[in-house]
Image (cartoon, coloured by chain):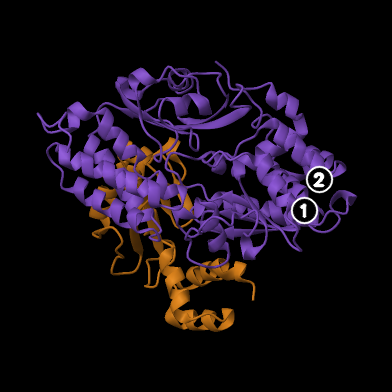
Chain colours: A orange, B purple
Amino acid sequence: MNYANFLERMHNIQDTYGYIPECEIDKVAREFNIPRSKVYGTIRFYSMFYTEPTGKYIIRVCDSLSCHINESKEIVEVIKDYLGIDNGETTEDRKFTLEIVECLGHCGEGPVMMVNDHIYTHVSKTMAIEILDKCV
Amino acid sequence: MEETLFLKREEVKDINNYDFPALKKALKMKQEDVIVEVKRSTLKGRGGAGFPTGLKWELAFKEAADKKYLICNGDEGEPGTFKDRYLLEESPLKVLEGILIAAYAIGADEGYIYIRGEYAKPIRVFSRVIEEAREKGILGENIFGSGFNFDLYLVKGAGAYVCGDETSLINSIEGKRGRSRIKPPYPVEKGLFDKPTVVNNVETLASAAEIINQGADRYLSLGTEKSRGTKLVCLSGDIRNPGIYELEFGQATLREIIDDFGGGLKNGSGLKFVVPGGISTSILLEDELDIPYTYEDLDAAGSSLGSGAVIVVGEDHDLIDLMLNVSRFFMDETCGTCFPCREGNRQIYHMLKWKKNGFTAKERQLIKDIGKTIHLAARCGLGQTSLNFISSVLDKFEDELMVRGDINVEG
């Protein structure tokens, strides 16, 4: 088994289910011939892998220094208010998960937010709401 | 002042319009000669540590092994840094060329490019580049009829800053937690799957390709004696024109970078301080900015060029809030292997979190002690540098941050 495929495998499971369910952990453990605890431990190390269901849209707002200076906190507050959830939580209808994350690599264009794979730069408070509305 | 275009000179995204001049040139040279040329250029690693690239290649080349690996490190995570993303999006073919040249030089027939999971667009762009390169025979067997075989695989990261450290990155590719390894053995001896491995940053490899293409002499004609060539500077923060600027070392002072390229501070705000190389480096104050942008001058000023992330901070920000922000970053991103880094960063975060009034001399001493302990005990660069920002803010804004009367008392 090529261990270099492990992360890719996890990404695929994550993309399919929106998280990595226990049955898949079992399968992967057998396939790669490693204990389940090791698979679980590895998954939990990476912030982009989840062992609980996430929302259809994962909203990531950067709050590292450059974005922080550009008032990313305000964007976070607006989104929290709008969705009624806190950092790390998922809405009841499983539509949105909100995460305050570290640098997304668009430091010159902050504040920055990411909805699944899509990046939005120079985000204003109204823009943040518009982006969420589009998802609904 | 104008940018010095060495890396940004020619940006081609379409593989049909690019004939890989540097790679063709390298494949006609002996492996040793490619290494000599890169060594002669004095290129240093651009990920932050600044290790001489040619020497790394030479060490890996000299290892006798049935298999060697070349890894391109695209796990750019240092806040304020976005040059690798820029190169992967705008110049992916040059990055690929650098990978192939490095692999040829050290004798690797397999390689990985590790791109952080958050970089969705670079991942898309580079996946396509790999596919097209395979179709055109630029990856695979007998590349350009030279007898050199090489294949490249893309590994997507999954959100862990520490994987930017080369040994953590190797663990991550092996499907493990991204924790650093004890060195020695260094990756050039025992790296990926215990085989000799070279891990190079994206900008480093693109630079190596241009060095082979334009020649080490051209590279040596740029910069200062101790910092040759050019650097992609990532300007961000309270600045009018943020972005990526390619500068010849020594071409401009930090102040000129901020004023001439960055257009000065936005909203007419005054300057509080500058982070010259990402949040793992010590800050510089307004009166420390008249130094040429080179490795040696930033070192002499007590900071470091780091990854090239220049973050400009205006005067309207609350220092404790900024310290807390940086502290949270390191608390979240420490891999947890070395106790002082894991617990030290957590303690400092909690100390800052409840801080409303100034620091006492005792608290300052405590932060310094923790910083020193982490620096001495952590085995990777993340830990060693994790308190540079906080310690330097505390030192340089003593008047503002210390409880009155406690400034000069040694705790």
Left or right of B212 on screen, residue B356: left
Left-right relation of B348 to B142: left
For disc 1, the chain is B
Residue B31 marker: 2
Q: Residue furthest right?
A: B145
Query: How many numbered marks are there?
Result: 2
Q: Quadrant of the C terminus of chain B?
A: top left
Q: Are marks 1 and 2 in contact (CB under 8 Å)?
A: yes
Q: Which dot marks residue A65? A: none
Q: Amino acid at mark 2?
A: Gln
Of residues A21 and A30, which is closer to you in this image? A30
**Amino acid bearing label 1:** Gly
Question: Considering depth in this image, is B74 or A34 the residue closer to the camera?
Answer: A34
Residue drawn at the location 69% of the way across and 27% of the way down: B219
The lab-note entry on whether marks 1 and 2 share a chain reads yes
Q: Quadrant of residue B3?
A: top right
List the residue tagged with mark 1: B107
On screen, residue B9 above or below B84: above
How far from the left and from the top, in percent, is residue B308? 50, 34
Q: State the image quarter where residue B355 is shown.
A: top left
Residue B169, given in percent of the width and then of the height, sits at: 54, 57
**Dot 1: few (<14), some (14–19), or many (≥20) neighbours within 10 Å?**
many
Q: Mark 2 falls on what kind of element?
A: helix
Distance of mark 1 from mark 2, alpha carbons? Answer: 8 Å
Q: What residue is drawn where x is 61% and y is 44%?
A: B202
Question: Residue B233, can we see it?
Answer: yes
Residue name at image x 18 percent, y 32 percent: B401
Q: Chain of mark 2?
A: B
Instruction: State the residue in front, A83 or B164.
Output: B164
Query: Compared with residue B111, is residue B206 higher up or lower down, i.e. above or below?
Result: above
